[in-house]
Every structure is written in structure tokens, then in C-alpha cells.
Image (cartoon, coloured by chain):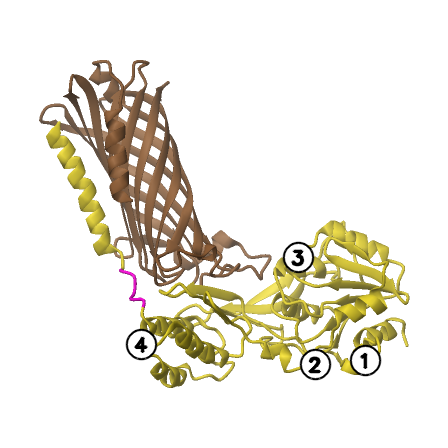
Chain colours: A brown, B yellow
Amino acid sequence: MKRTLLIFSLALMSLMVRANGDTLSMKYGRHWVTGLGLSVQTVWDEAMSPVRYNGTSLRINPSLQKTTSKHWRTIGVSLSVGGLRSAYYEESERGKATNFGFNFDYRYLRHLTDFGKGNEVFLGGGFRTLNNARLHNQLDNSVLPFDSFTSLSLEGGLQRSFLWKQRDFLVRYSLGLPLVSLAMRPNFVSVYNFVNPESKFFNERIEEHGLSSFGSYFRMISKIELLYKLRTGNLMSLSYQWDYYSYNKVHQLNVATHSITFSRYFNY
Amino acid sequence: MKRILYICFGVLISFAACEEVLIEKNPSNDPITNFDILWKIMNERYSFFEYKAIDWDSVYDVYRPQVSTTTSDVELFDAMKEMLRLLQDGHVNLRSDFDIVRFPDLYLDYPQNFDRNMLERVYWEKDYRITGFLINREIQGVGYIYYGSFGAPISDDDLDFVLERFEDLPALIIDIRNNEGGAPQNAFRMIERLISRRTHVYNHQFKSGPGADEFSEFEEIYANTKNDVVKWNKPVYLLTNRNVYSAANLFTAMMKAVPQVTQIGDFTGGGGGVPAGAELPNGWAFNFSSTILSLPDGFIVENGLAPDIFVEQTPEDVANGIDPILDRAIELAKGN
């Protein structure tokens, strides 16, 4: 599946229409971005079961982005829904889990330095939330495995414009590393308190888990994006993101997500 | 340009490779590993070992030697089934493609004390109403509700309609025989009509860690009264049998805290732990009790709740079209 995504992304690149030769307006501007993507996910969550789950999700990423010669700011959300299943239960519908995701990201990076020809380096911070819930009929109606992390992060970025076959392109690479996070996970048996009508779900989770940092929670978001300018002045892009996180309190959790996203950048 | 594409491609491949190292491999799908994982998860997460005085380590010593690398799926399932049935817990199930572990002893070892066919023909007859999922009618001057599953949602409108219908009658019979559970929310929706103030209905604690004695603190659970709805403060007779399980057992536990309620019939079947679940590497899934629920006085409700008035229905009663449990409730409701 990962290989298919790579081939798909390279094929899309080759279909891009001819651009205007204006790299400056590609690098800097204010854009409303709409992204539609496909993710492939591998999950090891002992709050569910000590087995690997794999699946694909559909992803929507609306965001706002502003880039100047001094800074690079983005604010956006990501919504995803898809299926997960363990390796040995492919024949049965009961073996399927449904995975829901909601992320909110705000990143502010300052232009740090230039190097080489057209390479710009950015460094800054961010506020990132990561929320996933997995509904699995195999478990029980009282079981809700989920993970929620709200983080302050260190953010880095690199952008470079280049010419290829007389067409202007911009490639951006960004890396996010959460430093300190508020983590919420299910209790030891992954059962939410559905026998108590007065239960405050989020309050209980916050009380149980609290703050985490390196050692208990690690996340890395690595994204590479290729942008191309359309005749209208808007941009289109194809990006690949690898988002990995692990959390080792209560139950071991490791999740890796590969996403290919096709986006349109609209000037505003 | 080529160089950039190569770099991009290299980055992609290297991350994909990292992932294989960072994420645990699937455990081996062999009989021994499957057995061990089942035993271990139960060992760490099942909530009633101490209450049921079960030494799970010795259970392992007995059943693990029955499993080897050449054990077939059916043999493995049967070994697991025997092991799990020792827990005598209706919330413990193991599901494969060819069978399900369950614990029917909870009700098969006792009289049925309920015959819906006879009940419908003799007591409900043809003129009962079905309001949402509540079968209701007046029987010999007493309000009667049959609620067959807490999995069937009941609404405020349903309850308003039924209670208003019976408001001139001296008492209400709530028949939950053969109700094997569902959603506790429906139990709260019913009980809030019967109480006049916030009431402590039961205690609840979760398994909170892998150790045998790792539990959360007991949490007191309260039912709240509801305003602007039709209430009922006259006597209530709750009919139960051994098939009353899980959320229906929970409802019975809650009703113990309501002064005007009398439980009639047989013991409930029990089911006093909220079920959790997991999957094995071979794809079989299982459930188990993961919490402990007790009455406000500390009595654990896992093995069922005794009626205030014990009444049985014999096969002869059924043959003769008699439901002594319902008859006794009617008799009490009419003040005889």
C-alpha cells in the first residue's frame, strides 16, 4: 500500500499543468488551503489488544497559511475516518474497527537563515492536538480505546524553489516535535464510566494522566510538500507526511501514519 | 531536480523502515502464544478473582499443558473454554468463527420462572399496548409493564404515556424476567421516575492495574430525580428470574434503594462487572468483567440479587396457565 501511494504521488506530479515563472509569489503569500488525502496507518495499542492493526483513512485538511520573508504561519485542522483491522481477522465484519481522528495544529516559525541557492530555514514553535478514537465491535459497547495529546512543540521548516523542465516548483519540508503534552488515554481496562450518569469523561481522563514529555510520549511529524503555481495564481500541492507517536503509560501505544494529501492553495 | 527527488524518496523510505523497528511485531499466531495472551490479559484485567476465590496461576498450571504447537483450533478453543468457564461469569465470552464460550449454567441450572407464551395468552391477552418497547396493560386493576431488554431504548414520552395511563391504579408491576441487559442509561431513565431525591444506588470500582489488588477507589453512584415528567410514588413490584442479567441486574440493584419497591420471584442471574474485551493474534475475541459493582451496603451483585419475596413457577403452573410470581404481585398490589 505504501508503495502504491508513492507511485500515485509521483504520477500526480507528472500531471501538473504549466506554471508561471514567479517563484517569489509561490514562496510568500496568504492562502486558504483545502487538502484531501489518504492515510495508511499501523497501530499497536494494548488498550485494544496486543496485536497490530492496519488500515486506511480518508483525510480532510483545511488550513490557513501565511508565509513572508520573515515568518511562516499555519493554522488548520485535520479530520479523518477510516477502518482498522488486525492481521488475522480479515474475513469477518466483526473484526473491523472504525478509527476517527481530529487534529488541530497551529505553527509559527521565524525565518532563521538562508543557505545555498534559494534555501530558507525556519524555526519556531507550535500548538498541536492529536485525537484518535477507535470503535471496535469485537471488544464491547463499554470499551473506548482513544488517545488525545495536546502539545507545545518545536517546529522546523525548510523551503527551496527550483526549476525543472522550465517550470517553477517549490518544495517545503517541515518537522514537528512535541516537547510537553497533556495526554489522555483510557483507564487500564479501556472502559468508560457508562454506569455513572454523572461521570465527567474528560475530567476523569485529565485527572488520571496529566502531563507527559519525552520518555513517556514521543511524536514526530515529518512532512514534505511539492507546490506548483497554476495560471490563476493559486497553488496546488502534493504532500507526504509521516506522523509517528508512542506513549508508554498504562498501555503501550505506537501509531505510525503515512499520508498523501493533494491540496489547493487559494490566495486571499 | 533528480537529486531532490532522490532525497525525497530516501526520506520516505527511511521513515517507513523506522516504523518497522519502532512498532511491536505481531505476536506469533500459534496455539501456545494465543493461550498465553488470553491467560495473561485475564490475569491482569479480570475483576472477580478474589471475590470468586480463584487461583488463576493454578488454573494456568492445569490448562496450559493441554496446549502444544500441534493443538488444533477446536482443541485450543475447548481448552480455553474449560478454563474460562471456571469463572462462572456470563460476561466472559470467547468468540471464534465456529463457537462462542458462554455460561448458560446461570439460568439452566434453575427453574425458568417465566413463560412468555403462556403469559401473553393468559395475562396480556389481545389488548395490551406496546409503547416504545414497553408492553403495558392493566391486569386485574393493577398497572403492568413488561420490559424485555435494556438494549431497547425507552424514552421519556414512553414512560410519561404509560405512567399517566396507570395514574389512578394503586400499584405498578415492572416485569423484567428474561431481560438479559443492555444499556444502563435505560435503567436510570426508569428509576428517576420512582425517586423523589438524589439517591445513592450502588458503588462501582474499576480494575486499575495489572496487580491482583489494583482497583480504583469505590465510587458512589447516584440516580437523580427528574422534574416536569410523570412520576410514580406508589408501590412497585419488580418481577425477576435467573435470566435477569447485566444491566437488568444493575436495575434490580438500583431498585433496592427505592423504598416502595418489592422484588418478587427468583434471584437475578447476576453480572456485576462492566465487560471489557480484547483480541487474540488468531483473531478470536473475548470479553470479561473489568469492574466491581456493589450495593450501597457493600454487597457485590456479581452472583445475583435475592428477591424480597421468593416465588417459583413450576412446569405444572405453566401447563395450567398460572404465573404465581405475577399472581403474587397482583395480590400484594391489591392489598390482599
Whether tag 1 and tag 4 are in contact, CB under 8 A, the answer is no
Rendering coords of residue B332 (x, y %): 85, 75
**How dense is the environment of label 2, judged by Cα within 10 Å: few (below 14), some, or many (20 and up)?**
some
Task: Name which of mark 2 and mark 4 comes first in the sequence.
Answer: 4
* Kind of residue indicated by mark 2: Pro
Residue A27 in sight from this viewpoint: yes
**Circle 4 sits on which residue?**
B70
* Kind of residue indicated by mark 4: Thr
Examine the rendered structure and indicate whether residue A264 appears above or below residue A150: above
**How dense is the environment of label 1, judged by Cα within 10 Å: few (below 14), some, or many (20 and up)?**
some
Same chain for the residues under marks 3 and 2 in the image: yes
Q: Quadrant of residue B115?
A: bottom right
Residue found at x 33% / y 23%: A265
Q: Which residues are magenta?
A: B25-29
Rendering coords of residue B124 (x, y %): 83, 64
Q: CA distance from mark 2 to mark 4?
A: 42 Å
Same chain for the residues under marks 1 and 3 in the image: yes
**How dense is the environment of label 3, judged by Cα within 10 Å: few (below 14), some, or many (20 and up)?**
some
Query: Foreground mark, 2 or 4?
Result: 4
Pick the front one: A212 or A221:
A221
